[in-house]
Amino acid sequence: MANYLVSKKGLMELIGHEAIVQTRYRDSVGVWTIGVGHTRSAGAPNPEVFRGTMSIKDVFALFKKDLQKYVSAVNSVLRIDVSQTEFDALVSFHFNTGGIKQATLVKSLNNGERRKAAQEFMNWIKPPEIKERRQEEQRLFANGVYAKGGRATVYTATAVGKVEWGSGTSIDLTEEDV
């Protein structure tokens, strides 16, 4: 069995789903976060006490470090060979849900039922706002289509950690060292 890595397109896709915030902010459930979904549980820096602004380069380096545990977890559940786009979709799914070991889509995939596995991405659409992301991961898995086009949005956050969702700046990740 191969030991897969996320492709550059996969990294860009995942960042496109998650967005970038260079200062600390509170996520949707109130957890202090920075960069691309980095929380205290992932290790240093601790967003609860970090007061600076991370460079885009540092955000990407931290994201790649954090992502390794998700890549390893996806590799650990695979019992069959997968395509690069299937792997990228699975890592995106796991990064967002943390549910790769419980997901029925893994059982279906390991049984060679790729079509069924693709359909089962949609078993994970809570909260409802995540539905579009699951559909994009499903298309990436089933059809090899990256939805984000190498683009991501950089948002600012207030001093109290509220992300200013209405004032994001789109960046082209193909021009960055992702």
Image: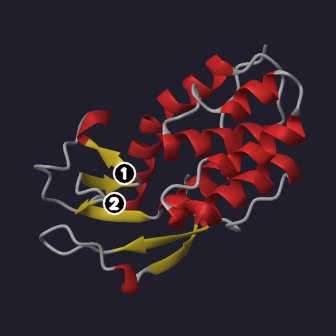
> To which residue does mark 1 refer?
58
How crowded pointer 1 is (Cα within 10 Å; few <14, some 14-19, many 20+) is rated as: few
- Number of marks: 2
Q: Residue at x 38, y 51 (%)?
A: 37
85 and 54: which one is in front?
85
The quarter holding residue 29 reads bottom left
Q: Residue at x 50, y 47 (%)?
A: 96
> Looking at the picture, which amino acid does disc 2 mark?
Ser
Mark 2 and mark 1 in contact (Cβ < 8 Å)?
A: yes
> To which residue does mark 2 refer?
55
How crowded pointer 2 is (Cα within 10 Å; few <14, some 14-19, many 20+) is rated as: few
Residue at far bottom of view: 166
The quarter holding residue 159 reads bottom left
176 left or right, relative to 148: left
Q: CA distance from mark 1 to mark 2?
A: 5 Å
Up/down of 27 relative to 162, above or below: above
65 left or right, relative to 178: left
Confirm whether residue 84 shows in the render. yes
Label 1 residue SS = helix
Confirm whether residue 7 shows in the render. no
Label 2 residue SS = loop
Q: Residue at x 46, y 64 (%)?
A: 19
Q: Residue 123, how many percent across, how many down?
A: 65, 47
Q: Residue 110, how many percent across, how many down?
A: 80, 22
| Quadrant where the N terminus is found in the figure | top right
The quarter holding residue 83 reads top right
137 left or right, relative to 98: right
Q: Residue 103, how many percent across, how many down?
A: 63, 33
> Looking at the picture, which amino acid does disc 1 mark?
Asp
Q: Residue 26, how many percent across, how many down?
A: 24, 60
Report the coloring of the rendering. secondary structure
